[in-house]
Every structure is written in structure tokens, then in C-alpha cells.
Amino acid sequence: MIDHPEINLVANRNIGSVQGSGGRDALHYHSDLHHEPPLIEFIFLDALQVPAHGGATVWVDLCAAYDALSAEAQARIDHLVVRYGLRKDLDFDTYFKASATVLATRRQSTQVRLVQTNGRTGRKSVWPNAGPQSNHHAQIVGMDPDESRALLTELFEHCTDERFRYKHEWQSGDACLWHNIQTLHGRESFPEDEARMMRHLNILGITDPNQLSEN
């Protein structure tokens, strides 16, 4: 917003001179700016105006998804590291509305642990931010690319099972705060002739020890 540039307008409409971003199509499950240090720990979303139909946000509980894995599966993934980066075939310049310097940083790759541990609660979560429609490319460090792709796909499908989902049907005035590192979230589509306008705020938190950016 104009007076508070740290607040983003996620909307399919503009408010005065403030340009909305995000459109009205469905968004795949993802965590925000997963590839960029420091990690966004929390996200706040405030509903200014919502459509009569559609536009719900669906969250995935990655702690519950980790807990549901077998002990053998947990042991297999506990120490794995994933290298993420924005896909180079997609144009994010307009979407991010950022300076060339910031965009260059966001196009670097970074490494994060596949299994994250919450420093406050000690709970573990599995974090495969690499769905079939993902804006990121992902590769498990030290693993054959085909094996890495298969494992990340398997984990993503496990995590997004309906057992671990919470769906929120927005009403104007609703506000939600969530842990970006231990959840995925997605959005359902809504009619083009209806408005969905949200104030969006990222709260930076931690830097994963494996976040070693490289070109």
C-alpha cells in the first residue's frame, strides 16, 4: 500500500493508484518465497472484499503430514537438503513489482532442509514446495535428478492429501495468520466479474543454515 509499502495488495482489482496482484485463477499449493533468504516465517492476510462464490484459501498442515509418515520414511528424509530457485521460463518481474537488484536476488537458488523443526515447539514438518505447477525448480542435493523428482512428487502428493487440509471460506473482515514454513497454501478460483481484495503482509523469521545462495 502507498503509505506502507511492506503491505501488498493481493487482488484482482486496483485501489486507486495501488496495483493489485494475484489474479483470480486457482493457485497451486505452495509456500511464499521459499527460495529466498531469510525465510518468511509468518503471513498475515486481511480480507477487504471477497467474492460471493469461490476464492477460498486451503492450507496444508505439514507437521501432521510428517507425523503420518512411517518411521522408515522419516529417517530417509530427515537429513535431506533441497536446492530451490525460481523457474527461469516464467516472468515474475511484473508480479513482484520489485527493483532489478531484488529480482536478481530472487532469481538465485538457495538450499533448505526438507524437514524443518520449529524452534519454539520442536515439531517437525516435511516441506516439499515442489508441486507439478510450482513456480520453483527443485533438486535434492546429492541425489539423482530422477530419484529426487520422484521423491519430491511422492511427498507433495502425501502432504496435500485431504487429511491434512483446512479450507477457509472468506468473509469480509476475516484475518488469518499462519506459519509459512510448516504449511502450504493454495487458492480456489473465483468469477472474473467479482472482486477479491486482500491486504497481505510477510513476517520474516529465520534463515535456514543450508541457505547458501548461488547463481
Image (cartoon, grey):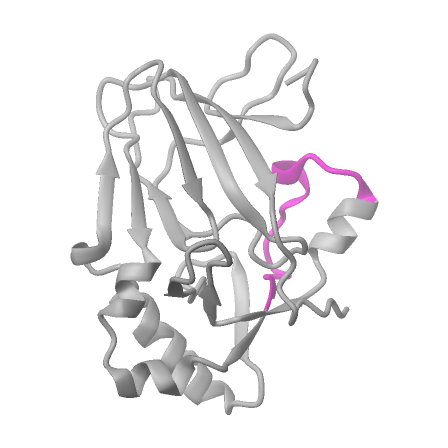
Q: Residue furthest left?
A: 163
Q: Is residue 27 visible?
A: no
Q: Residue furthest right?
A: 101
Q: Is residue 156 above or below residue 146?
A: above
**Quadrant in which the N terminus appears:** top right
**Quadrant in which the C terminus appears:** bottom right
Is 93 covered by the magenta stretch?
A: yes
Q: Residue at x 42, y 62 (%)?
A: 122
Q: Position of residue 151 (x, y in %)?
A: 37, 81
Hey, which quadrant is residue 93 in on the image?
top right
Q: Is residue 115 visible?
A: yes
Q: Position of residue 176 (x, y in %)?
A: 38, 30
Q: Residue at x 34, y 20 (%)?
A: 174
Front position in the image: 193 or 144: 144
Q: Which residues are magenta?
A: 84-100
Q: Is residue 26 above or below residue 82?
A: above
Relative placement, left or right, of 207 versus 29 is right
Q: Position of residue 161 (x, y in %)?
A: 21, 60
Q: Position of residue 193 (x, y in %)?
A: 34, 18
